[in-house]
């Protein structure tokens, strides 16, 4: 996926974000988090066996898989994760 630098800059400036905006950031390789999560938790997309298959994972030190619930999907408190 090509990175639209102007769109990326706008999303970062407009934080917090909605789920669909968060998905764009993940697709271009960024880590994201919700404001309600502890400060070290984030979500990222990890490539699986094929080049086109991505699997979202929730990372909190244990490397658990992330399955968003309805609260996550409707949330508008997504942020770019900064290490």
Image: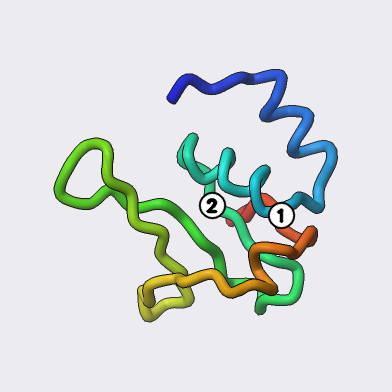
User: Residues under labels 1 and 2: Cα distance?
Assistant: 9 Å
Please state, as top left, top right, bottom left or bottom right, where the C terminus lies in the image.
bottom right
- Give me the residue at 69% from left, 73% from top: 71
Along the viewing direction, whichever of 67 and 31 lies nearer the viewer: 67
The picture places residue 67, in percent across and down from the top left corner, at 46, 72
Give the crowd class for mark 2: few <14, some 14-19, many >=20 residues within 10 Å. many
- Residue 77: quadrant of the picture: bottom right
Count numbered badges in the picture: 2
Give the crowd class for mark 1: few <14, some 14-19, many >=20 residues within 10 Å. many
Please state, as top left, top right, bottom left or bottom right, where the N terminus lies in the image.
top left
Compared across the picture, whether 17 is left or right of 44 comes to right
Residue named by callout 1? 79
Compared across the picture, whether 52 is left or right of 38 comes to left
Q: Secondary structure at mark 2?
A: loop
The picture places residue 19, in percent across and down from the top left corner, at 66, 53
- Give me the residue at 67% from left, 29% from top: 8
Compared across the picture, whether 21 is left or right of 27 comes to right
Please name the colour scheme applied to the rendered image: rainbow
- Residue 76: quadrant of the picture: bottom right
Residue named by callout 2? 31
Along the viewing direction, whichever of 20 and 65 lies nearer the viewer: 20
The picture places residue 25, in percent across and down from the top left corner, at 58, 41
Q: Earlier in the sequence, mark 1 or mark 2?
A: 2
């Amino acid at each position: 996926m090509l990175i639209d630098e102007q769109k990326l800059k706008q999303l970062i400036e407009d934080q917090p974000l909605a789920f669909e905006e968060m998905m764009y950031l993940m697709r271009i390789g960024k880590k994201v988090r919700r404001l309600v999560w502890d400060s070290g938790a984030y979500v990222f997309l990890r490539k699986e066996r094929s080049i086109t298959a991505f699997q979202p994972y929730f990372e909190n030190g244990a490397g658990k898989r992330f399955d968003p619930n309805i609260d996550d999907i409707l949330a508008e408190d997504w942020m770019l994760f900064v290490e």
